[in-house]
Image: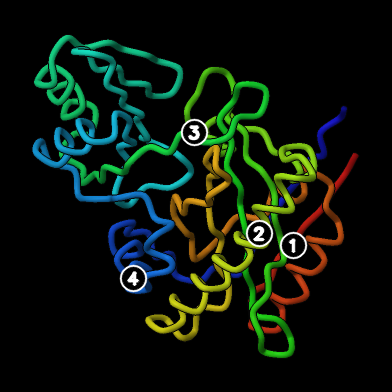
Amino acid sequence: MNRPNAYISAKRAPRRSNKLLKTSLIKDNSYIAAHIPPTAAMTQASLLRMINRYGMVYVKPKHGSLGRGVIRITKQGTRYVSHAGVTVTTYTSFQSLYSAILKRTKNESYIVQRGIHSLRYRGKVFDLRIVVQKSPNGDFEVTGVAGRIAQGGRVVSNGAGGGAVGTIDSLLTPQQRSVAMPEIYKLSLAVMAQVRKRWPKQNEIGLDIALDYNLKPWILEFNTRPDHRMFILIGARNTIAKIVRYGARYGRKYRLSLYR
């Protein structure tokens, strides 16, 4: 199938990129907190504690975006395996693993987050991008849902990391959708309401959500300036039209084109 060429530009709102700050903001709500993987500033102690407890963690730049710099670490017996990009490395001790991570992170602030054993699509990791926007009548609404699929042996699903996109219908069975989607919508709207308590002028967010094998949604992170190009790539013209129409009401402007 031919992929559409896409171009997007938008009137930029300030990016709030601090992952720990955003996590702490929404954890104040107990319902939302139950859907957030444990997350902490990465230190030698916190990394060791969390990998021993959960067996799999993700290490991410505190201010990163587009999946850059993300490392998955798993404990396999007495060995530790890191997976960054397409590179998989095995370490015989935690100290050798941590030393390698410090060389890679180069004194940048990182976080460590419990890894979620999530649903796969043809053996590949995927998550869901959920867009919530303020509607013309003043309520908040989920206006976009799409899947992001890791490719080429990678552990991140972002487009910048070589990820592909897919529709919800292609990624989830009808039974899975009937169970998972109502809860995802409820959770996404709750996050928007919580964000507005701190940032009352925030009119749009994008959430990255993974589903575990019990179909529980887990919030990997949320973005205050989401990228909508994935909806262009799956040909979701009605979704793009709604996103643009709603954004125009609160001053966000997009220029989009879609060619097949």
Q: Nearer the viewer, mark 2 or mark 4?
A: 4
- Where residue 208 is drawn, which disc sits there? none
C-alpha gap between disc 1 and disc 3: 27 Å
C-alpha gap between disc 2 and disc 3: 24 Å
Q: In this view, does 115 lie above or below 15?
A: above
- Per the image, the residue denoted by label 1 is 255
- Per the image, the residue denoted by label 2 is 9
Q: In this view, does 217 lie above or below 115?
A: below
Give the percent coordinates (x, y) of residue 160.
54, 36
- Per the image, the residue denoted by label 3 is 156
Looking at the picture, which amino acid does disc 4 mark? Leu
C-alpha gap between disc 1 and disc 4: 32 Å
Q: In which quarter of the image is residue 28?
A: bottom left
Give the percent coordinates (x, y) of residue 246.
73, 76
- Where residue 25 is drawn, which disc sits there? 4
Give the percent coordinates (x, y) of residue 256.
77, 57
Lower sequence index among marks 1 and 4 = 4
Residues tagged 2 and 3 counted as in contact (Cβ below 8 A): no
Looking at the picture, which amino acid does disc 3 mark? Val
For image coordinates 44% across by 70% down, the residue present is: 14
For image coordinates 79% across by 69% down, the residue present is: 242
Dot 2: what SS? strand
Residues tagged 2 and 1 counted as in contact (Cβ below 8 A): yes
Lower sequence index among marks 2 and 3 = 2
Looking at the picture, which amino acid does disc 1 mark? Arg
